[in-house]
Amino acid sequence: MNALRTIEKIYKDLFEVEPILVRSPGRLNLIGEHTDYNMGFVLPAAIDKAVYFAIAQRTDRTCKLVAADLHEEHEFTLDRIVKSEKGWPNYLMGVVDQLIKAGYNLKGFNCVFGGDIPIGAGLSSSAAIEAGLTFALNHLFNLEIDKLSLVKLAQKAENEFVGVNCGIMDQFINIFGEDQHALCIDCRSLEYELVPFDYDHVSVVFFNTNVSHSLASSEYNLRREECTKGVEIIKKEFPAIRSLRDVQPEMLESFKTKMEPLTYRRCKYVVDENERLLKACDALKVHDLESFGSLLYQTHEGLSRDYEVSCPELDFLVDETKNIPAVYGARMMGGGFGGCTINIIENEAVAEVTSLIAKKYKEKFNREATVYVTKISAGTSIVSSEVNETV
């Protein structure tokens, strides 16, 4: 909680009043990659790294934002919200913009924020900022917005004001996450189910490749097009099919000769991944970490071979864990072509395994692999306030 107390102290030193304190976590996705835009399932969880907010009302219509980690400030008024060239203020102003457009009555506020989510590691610091501020303003001004509406407002802030066409998973897990649980989210209906991840003997460890290949954005859009192309072919015979979510493995197999091999492989990965995710949920419900870990390796294989969004660095980090008994499973996480691998490792072996893998990675690529050790945690909440409230 050191980061929280730092944010609180900075706020009190600047504004000399007692703020409301909010914790807004980063997230990981255990399994279910590139399934969201195919209306499938995802299995994210909130983590113990977070963005912290200290916030209180003003008496005018001015909003002052202080990014503690960047040592930067930004000020705007509720009557004129204009994009900032600095970048970071847009994630917060976008939230205010959405609340005003939705008809909510706001006043000015002072806000100091910062935390310990690694930037650029794929742990969703942007959603933590957006959803965290949405949650904080809802509480601060007694707006009485329900949780799902908070999620949608935060997502729209990134889509419309920041200009990033993200899905809803990151904001959803931020608001709905619960300690020692992952969340199986149906990306079509937005129904969800809590799935236990209550293991005291393992940690979720990330190896950051520290590479970002330029293919990522263009190939991401191409994968979406390839999936859509496959769906259109299937719809000619099965008009009820709306997305790859509706396609079973047997149905897809019957179209193997009617699709280009590349289109078939892309569709196969997505159809298989939805099946794997449901099996993964079943495994976690009966505390079968071995089966769960095996499914993670299968996902990586599919992402690398069929969906082709991996890279040599990611493949190397996953392959190096396969013969280590203390590692239950590993895979690349995120859009691909760089970023992190996610690994389930026994606590007592974390130091030894991470040291070994990082050493081999440096020898192979002459590049450092940054290591982050995390635990599953609760979603966004009020940590404390003037009346010591806990939500």
Image (cartoon, rainbow, N blue to C red):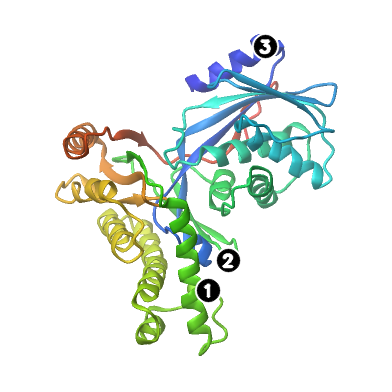
Q: For residue 212, what is the image quadrant?
A: top left
Residue drawn at 39 percent across, 38 percent down: 375
Q: Is residue 156 above or below residue 250?
A: above
Q: Can residue 344 be seen from the camera position used here?
A: yes
Q: How many angstroms separate mark 2 from mark 1 (CA)?
A: 10 Å
- Which label was assigned to residue 188? 2
Mark closer to the chain start, 3 or 2? 3
User: How far is mark 3 from mark 1, CA to CA?
Assistant: 52 Å
Quadrant housing the C terminus: top right
- Please give the name of the residue rendered at 22% of the width and 31% of the height, measured from the top-left corner: 351
Q: Nearer the viewer, residue 246 or 92?
A: 92
What secondary structure is found at the residue carrying circle 3? helix
Q: Helix or strand or loop: what does disc 1 sit on? A: loop
Instruction: Name above or below for residue 296 compared with residue 226.
Output: above
For disc 3, the marked residue is: 14
Q: How many marks?
A: 3
Instruction: Give the Cα separation between the discs numbered 3 and 2.
Output: 45 Å
Q: Amino acid at mark 2?
A: Arg
Figure quadrant of residue 250: bottom left
**Marks 2,1: beta carbons within 8 A:** yes
Comes first in the chain, label 2 or label 1: 2
Locate residue 248 relative to residue 242 in the image: left or right.
left
Horizontal placement of 235 versus 81: left or right?
left
Picture layout, residue 321 above or below residue 55: below
Please say whether residue 40 is visible from this viewpoint: no
In this rendering, position of residue 201 left or right of residue 197: left
